[in-house]
Every structure is written in C-alpha cells, then in structure tokens.
Amino acid sequence: VQLQASGGGLVEAGGSLRLSCSGSGRTFSRYTIGWFRQAPGKEREFLSGISRGGGRTQYADSVKGRFTISRDNAKNTVFLQMNSLKPEDTAVYYCAGVSTISSAPIPTRQMSYDDWGQGTQVTVSS
C-alpha cells in the first residue's frame, strides 16, 4: 500500500494538530498502521498503532493521554489527533503500514512495517 502523511505544521505549545495518513488501493483495511516520529539527532520512535479494523490501539508512554489514533477504512485514512503539544514533540512524523491477520499484535518496531509514507513536519514553539 502507498501511504501519504499530511497535516503537519507549526503550532504553539499546548495547541493541537491532526495528522492524516492516506492509503491507496482496495486493501487498506488489511493493514495495521503505525505512527512514528524522528527528531533531529534522534532515532525514529514508535508513537501509536491501530489494528486493521480499528478495534485495538497502542500508544507509547510519551504520548499516552495526549494523542489519539483512529481510522476510517471507507476513506482509506488513519488519523492521529495530537493535543497538548509540547516543544519536544517537534519532529518529522511518519505513518507506516503492514499487512496482517486480524488478531495480530500491533508492532512497535520500525522493521516490522513494510510501507512508509514520506513524513510530515510538526514544529511546536514554546
């Protein structure tokens, strides 16, 4: 599946942004989708993931309670609602997908995902 992340931008600390990950093709609903980010000089880190049907989600401790992942398979889109943003959230955000069976756990490692979007920049000013 081809993925495209969008929705990044510049926001003040405490503000919100909603990122979108749009997928191509009729098989999008077979894909577990994850969100990652990479800040300058740091490794890419897992933020959140959502199962094929949207019934299961997973979050990194760093974003739990502030970020919410959801999906609309009819529109081939996964969303990441980001609230209470902090300057340390500044990074390039990527979505990634992997075709899985319905009961598969949500992967948190980069190497578990096969398809990646191009990234969208999020900058949070203090």
Image (cartoon, rainbow, N blue to C red):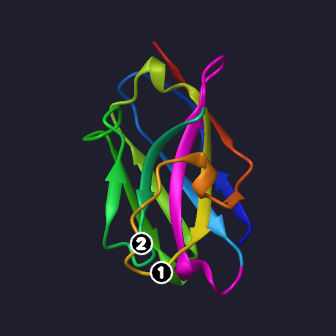
**The quadrant where residue 50 appears:** bottom left
Q: Which residue lies furthest to the top in this view?
A: 126
Q: Which residue is rendered at x = 59% and y = 67% of the image?
A: 98
Q: Position of residue 51 (x, y in %)?
A: 41, 69
The x, y position of residue 82, in whole percent, is: 40, 42
Can you say whether 77 is above or below 86 in the image? below
Query: Which quadrant is the N terminus positioned in?
Result: bottom right
Residue 86 horizontal side relative to residue 35, left or right: left
Q: Mark 1 points at which residue?
A: 101
Viewer-nearest residue: 35 or 112? 112
Judged from the image, the secondary structure of the residue bearing numbered disc 1 is loop
109 above or below 2? above
Horizontally, residue 18 falls left or right of residue 21, namely left
Of 111 and 28, the residue lying toward us: 111
Extreme residue toward the left, this view? 65
Q: What's the residue at 37%, 72% (across, down)? A: 54
Q: What residue type is labelled 1?
A: Ile
Cβ–Cβ below 8 Å for labels 1 and 2? yes
Tell me if residue 17 is in the magenta stretch: no
Q: Which residue is drawn at 66% across and 70% down?
A: 23
Give the extent of the magenta segment: 25-43
Q: Mark 2 points at which residue?
A: 104
- Left or right, 116 with respect to 73, comes to right
Placement of 16 over or under 53, stated as above or below: above
Q: Does residue 30 show up magenta in the picture? A: yes
Q: Nearer the viewer, residue 49 or 125?
A: 49
Badge 1: residue crowd in 10 Å (few <14, some 14–19, many ≥20): few
